Image (cartoon, rainbow, N blue to C red):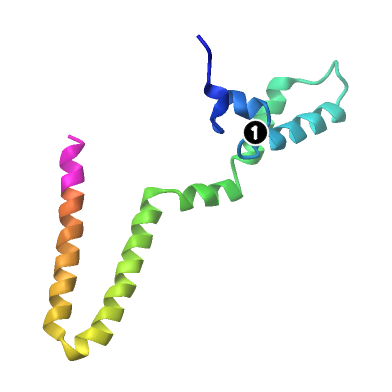
Amino acid sequence: MRDFAYLFPDSVAAWLQGRGDGRFQRYERHYRSDRAASSPEIFDLEKSNLLFSQRFHGGKWRFVSVLNSKPFAALTTFLIFLWGGSFLLSTVGTSQPVAAGVVLCVAFVGMRANKLRARFRHR
């Protein structure tokens, strides 16, 4: 049976061949600099890998993980709806306050209904 995992950019085979998102190049640079800094008899690959994981799983990568989190997505959605709602209320609300209120109520009830449906689907 033939393994086609190398075709996917996030597969281990693609990562080891240096394709994908740049993690291999970063690891290769780290490995080569650690290897050059110590003699071949003293070099410890396990310690080097631990140092690599400590060095590159902090800092800017935390920022990326925050941007990719569900709470951040929910906050962004809330702020967009808040901005849209305030824009709707200020422009349409002055001329047609009932229509603006109905649209906001429908939007918030729809969001709540979607959240409840998703919660019941996962049970």
Main SS, magenta region, reads helix
The answer to which image quadrant residue 12 occupies is top right
Residue 54: horizontal and vertical position, in percent? Answer: 63, 36
Q: Is residue 39 left or right of residue 26?
A: right
Corner quadrant of residue 85: bottom left
Q: Is residue 122 magenta?
A: yes
Residue nearest the observer in this picture, 98 or 38: 98
Q: Position of residue 58 (x, y in %)?
A: 59, 44
Q: Position of residue 35 (x, y in %)?
A: 82, 26
Quarter of the C terminus within the rendering: top left
Residue at 86% over, 29% down: 36
Residue type, mark 1 in image? Arg
Instruction: Please name the residue shown 15% across and 86% down the image.
Output: 96
Q: Is residue 64 magenta?
A: no
x then y, percent, for residue 9: 56, 33
Asked if residue 70 is positioned above or below residue 56 in the image, the reply reads below
Q: Is residue 116 above or below residue 37?
A: below
Q: Residue at x 18, y 64 (%)?
A: 108
> Pointer 1: what residue?
19
Task: Tell me where the magenta segment starts and ends, as one range.
Answer: 117-123
Residue 78 lies left or right of residue 63; in this view the side is left
Residues 91 and 40: in front is 91
Q: Residue furthest bottom?
A: 95
Mark 1: give few (<14), some (14-19) or many (20+) Cα within 10 Å.
Answer: some
Find numbered disc 1 in the image and state the secondary structure of the residue it sits on. loop
Is 115 on the left or on the right of 70, as rendered? left
Vertical order, 33 against 5 (above or below): below
| Closest to the observer, 78 or 100 | 100
